[in-house]
Image (cartoon, helix red, strand yellow):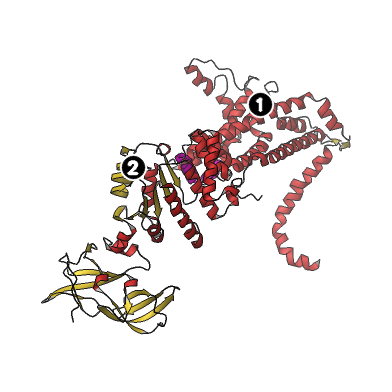
Amino acid sequence: MVGLTLRNTGKRYGALSIIQDLNLDVRDGEFLVLVGPSGCGKSTLLRMIAGLEDITDGTIAMDGRVVNDLPASKRELSMVFQSYALYPHMTVAKNLAFGLENMKVPRAEVERRVAEAARILQIEKLLDRKPRQLSGGQKQRVAIGRAIVREPKLFLFDEPLSNLDAELRVQMRAELASLYARLGTTMIYVTHDQVEAMTLASRIVVLRAGKIEQVGTPQELYTRPQNLFVAGFIGSPKINMIEARLTQGNDGLEATARGFRPFRIPALSTTDTAITVCVRPGSIALGTGAVQAEGTVRLVEYLGNETLLHVQLASGQILLVSGKEQGATKAGDTVTVGFELSDIHYFDSNGQRVEPLQHEGLLQ
Amino acid sequence: MRRFITRNAPGYTFLLPWLIGFFLLTLGPILASLYLSFTKYDMVSAPRWVGWDNYVYMFTRDRRFWKALHVTFSYVALAVPARLIMALAVAMILDKGLRSISLYRAIFYLPSLLGSSIAIAILWRQLFAKDGAVNAVLSFVGIDGPSWITDPNTSLYTLVVLAMWQFGSPMLIFLAGLRSIPKDLYEAAEIDGTPAWRQFTRITLPLLAPVIFFNLVLQTIDAFKTFSSVFIISHGNGAPADSLLFYTVYLFNEAFSFFRMGYASALAWVLLVIIAVFTGLAFLSSKYWVHYENERD
């Protein structure tokens, strides 16, 4: 196992900067997920840690030792590629053993480790097959097996599940989680899928345009997103963002948002008058709530355990409302939607989270 | 039948120029040469049927035939691997991502375009002559080189070097093959700590095998048929001392210097069989060393 320290780490291709001034500590034995939209630099960052890309600025250290100039093979890590990167002309057994043979591991030990990995991943019956004879999920297992046999101090995963179909992805996700529980090795995992991030991670790093937006546990990211980007990226269905203007009334701060009845909010740690009020779809109810608006149901998505309503307000904005007991609602119905002040996330005009100083009642 | 004709007549009309060319200029002469190979024919008097005499003479009494075979096989054995290795080496360098790769590709392909031309053959004579450019360079390091072209001990090697220099077309095919090997495989190998040489032997070569096989077959056939450059360099008769008596040169001499058309036809058919056998052997061997990505089991 290994801890990882990134200090002012950066990656530039000529004038183009991919990663800027990144500071991050990966704890020994944690499952860290790098998540972000395509092009945010998450794969590049992983490849820099792997040693497949040069580090142009700053340092990366493993257990306190700077590894900037250490070749990939000396970093004692394994990487699972999105494409699996299995050697197509070798059998599964040879694929698993290939790296160990490079390391001059004794033959008996190679066989022991291959058998062990095959047992863990339930691919014992596939050992004599070539990759082309395997299904996507089986290839994925072999790729993970190839990472396990080296008994590395650090596992790197580059979108390992994105080539699998939805059902298999859920299954492999669970298997990865149990693999992590069994091995306890430090893992760094790149994905653009926030559900994967939420379910697997000890901590999540949200990246955008080469910069860290927030680092935290899945719960922290969900309950206290530090900015609008994280609020919008984490959570499905997506959080509702409502623009509001603040005016200082005689008895407190009054918020006006198009489509909503004016409502009083607690004092905030900002002096901005234009803020964004965010509410998760699950926190919005029909007919009740301290903050209310009228709207028309445009779309009803029945998901089994819950129903997702697309409610259009007078302002034209669509609010997503999810809940269990909306089965009778039909498209075209006029509804009142509402939420409580305690469910609101406030963001200032720069999109940064601001905290209410205390909760107050509704202005009537 | 009538319907077949009316329906397909336009198509065959468009095919006609090619069909005429094929039957009159390709298939016709091929069959004619098969017949002539069993005759004695000097292009003046009518062909005279001699049965297997030409073939019997060839294998039992014609020492120049055996000499030509020896020269040609030596050439194929040296030139084909030399050219393929050269082509692969250059392709790998280009594949490493040089800037303005298309320019280099064009430059490296140029010798293949010029290679079989008469001018290059004449140039080759000059380069490897006693007072040629090669010896001029060697004299700088104090080596007094022989007359490479006119020395029977070295003349064949000058042609092998010429063949190596014309690496362009297999190089392009190798380059395309190298490009089709996923980069991930090398990255995975790198993380696994695979040394560069082992990456080459364990990943590049096996995955390139179908392309190597293709090039090997094509270049072998090509090498057996080498003619125009040798013809010029050997003064048209395999000189010096028959050291450049390529099979094709010998065949040409028999046909157009001595007008032994019947015998030359027999020689041509033997060459065809030789090439067919080598190609067949290559295909037979391929199942032991060529791995195809989409092969069915």
Classify mark 2: residues with Cα within 10 Å, few (<14), some (14-19) or many (20+): many
Q: Secondary structure at mark 2?
A: loop
Q: Read off the residue under disc 2.
A: A55
Which amino acid lies under the numbered mark 1 shown in the image of this protein? Ser
Q: Could you say where residue A137 lies in the image, as x and y percent from the top left?
A: 53, 55
Q: Which residues are magenta?
A: B174-191
What chain does mark 2 sit on? A
Whether A310 is drawn above or below B87: the answer is below
Q: Is residue B159 left or right of residue A6?
A: right
Q: Which mark is residue A102?
A: none
Q: Residues within 10 Å of mark 1 (few under 14, many from 20)?
A: many
With respect to residue B108, does B139 lie above or below? above
Q: Would residue A74 be counted in the magenta stretch?
A: no
User: Which residue is denoted by mark 1 in the rendering?
Assistant: B234
Between the residue at mark 1 and the residue at mark 2, the CA separation in whole angstroms equals: 59 Å
Q: Residue furthest front?
A: A182
A266 to the left or right of B102: left
Instruction: Check disc 2 and give the amino acid type.
Output: Ile
